[in-house]
Amino acid sequence: MIEAAVNGYLVALSLILAIGAQNAFVLRQGLRREHVAAVVAVCALSDAVLIAAGVAGFGTLSARLPWFGAAMRWLGVGFLLVYGALRFRAASQGGEALRPAATGAAPLGKVLATCLVLTWANPHVYLDTVVLIGSISAQHAPHQAVFGVAAACASLSFFTALGFGARLLAPVFARPVAWVWLELGVGLVMWAIAAGLALGG
């Protein structure tokens, strides 16, 4: 059970760490100190719903289709390898400085609408939470629920730290080299998880 919880937390954290539009948006809101709590709540709750769907749905499909678990495991391996390679590619391009916008505060409704679109209209979120986390959770039977709860906790802790800790990160992420190192770290973690899935199956 403890192993399932630790792995669930680390897997979800490594996936969420990948720099994308949603994380950049949360970080920008944190740098601006604008509607941070609402944005963090939307991101964390959305992830929790998707993770629950992945963990519950994957177990049901695996029971009905014996080949489904192995197929999704190898799909997860391939996805992690490609996504990790994309992180390395982003690092090789030098990273981007991220600075708060100079415009005035946006209304809450507009901010939340943007956050929802960045979360639910992103096809990667379904691969990450429903397919990938769902497939990895099956490797921890009968503790899939523990794996899923830990993954949701990782999402909540990450977005909370990112949103409310942004003021501390502002000087760091104003430099492109900080993004380069983060991209490299995420890529290495993803490839390590892919190796674990491939060798442990």
Image (cartoon, helix red, strand yellow):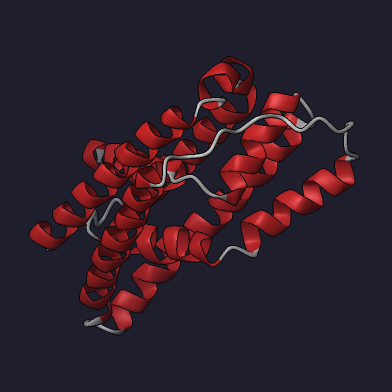
Q: Nearer the viewer, residue 155 or 31?
A: 31
Q: Give me the residue at 57% from left, 25% from top.
A: 174
Position of the C terminus by quadrant = bottom left
Q: Give me the residue at 55% from left, 20% from top.
A: 169
- Any part of residue 14 in sight: yes
Relative to 108, residue 128 above or below: below
Relative to 131, residue 151 above or below: above
Q: Position of residue 111 (x, y in %)?
A: 81, 44
Q: Position of residue 58 (x, y in %)?
A: 38, 69
Q: Nearer the viewer, residue 66 or 50?
A: 50
The quadrant where residue 78 appears: bottom left
Relative to 22, residue 106 above or below: above
Position of the N terminus by quadrant = top left
Left or right relative to 5: residue 153: right
Q: Position of residue 144 (x, y in %)?
A: 33, 54
The quadrant where residue 198 appears: bottom left
Q: Position of residue 120 (x, y in %)?
A: 64, 61
Q: Residue furthest left?
A: 199
Relative to 79, residue 155 above or below: above
Q: Give me the residue at 47% from left, 37% from top.
A: 153
- Any part of residue 44 in sight: no
Q: Residue furthest front?
A: 93
